[in-house]
Image: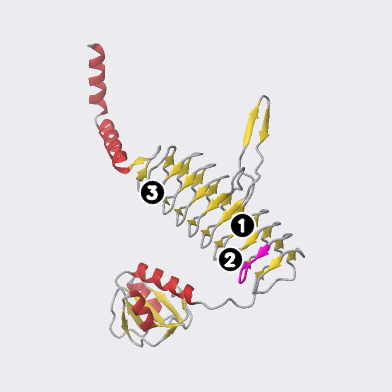
Amino acid sequence: MITVNQIAQLVNGTVMGDGDVPVKGLASYKYAEEGDATFVLSAEDLEAAAKSDTSCVITTEAVEGYPKTMLQVKDLKEAIVILYNAMREMKGPAKKGEIDPSASIAESAILGKNVAIGKNAVIGENTRIGDNASIGANCVIEKDVSIGNNTLLHPNIVVYDHVTIGNNVTIFSGTIIGADGFGFVPKGDKIYKVPQLCSVVIEDDVEIGANNCIDRGAFTDTVIGKGSKIDNLCQIAHNVKIGKNVLIAGMCGIAGSATIDDNTIFGAGVGVSDHTRVGKNVKVGAKSGITGVIHDNEVLFGYPARKVSDFKKLWGIETLMIKHYKKLKELILNMAKD
């Protein structure tokens, strides 16, 4: 629990009304309950929030005589992000976990304190689940898996054997971790499967969106580094190494044995070819294709990906060529005659 005055100190805001009002959560005014803070983006939202059950309204505007306690901030998005993360850190120990009777848990599995396991979940042999972890309905956790403290797996997730998942990890529904990588060798009239002998390591504080596929390694583990965040519908192939605090937007595909170094950001739909290395602090625009080594601190766009300044020049040249196509054609034809 935190008061509006304390929130104002965190976000450098101005309180209008009762600053001692306690706040327990953050929600849209459409769903807010008493004790929640909400945020408004328009005059219409401001009017609707006044009629809601919220206890505090966060906005960029000052409104005299507003019926709710109001917190005025300069940057609404920044204030919400700061408050949300501060409230997450202030949460106390999780409530005692409940294990649904329909869950199937191997006798050799080791469960920490306050573990919650949903309906029809399956926990395999020798799997270890840390304190305050939550395993959603219909999840399948195979043998010899390690899941850390305070980790949340939403319903309908599959974790294959020997996978390691760290502390404070969140994984959303439909994701599959540790399936075989795509490794095949054509020889003659037959295609041989390359053995996928290693696994997946997901480090602390990672968040993985819905419907991702993270393949197990063939000869080294696939690794997702601490603090990295992966959006929905991404494919992470075998042996990939993703560094710390990497942001990967939806529908990206990273081919086998590629390395993505710390603090790099991918827009949606980026493709990375196999055995490629992308340096630290790199930013790659949506739909770009990476086929070679990328050095630290580059900003790239296009297919194949190139420096944004080079891409703009190329785009400018193409635009001029299209605009003056007839003149260029005539010039080329005349040169050919000469």
Which residue corresponds to mark 2? 152
**SS at circle 3:** loop
Percent from the top left, x then y, of residue 39?
39, 73
- Label ID, residue 164: 1
Q: Is residue 32 above or below residue 305?
A: below
The residue positioned farthest toward the front in the image shown: 220
Q: Would you say residue 70 sits in the magenta stretch?
A: no
Which residue corresponds to mark 3? 282
User: Does residue 217 appear to the left or right of 62 in the view shown?
Assistant: right
User: Does residue 109 appear to the left or right of 326 in the view shown?
Assistant: right
Between marks 3 and 1, how big is the CA–CA gap?
27 Å
Between 215 and 109, which is closer to the camera in this rendering?
A: 109
Amino acid at dot 1 = Thr
**SS at circle 2:** strand
Percent from the top left, x then y, of residue 271?
47, 43
Residue found at x 60% / y 78%: 95
Amino acid at dot 2 = Leu
Query: What are the residue bounds of the magenta stretch?
Result: 128-134
Q: Is residue 254 above or below residue 97?
A: above
| Badge 3 or badge 2: first in the primary sequence | 2
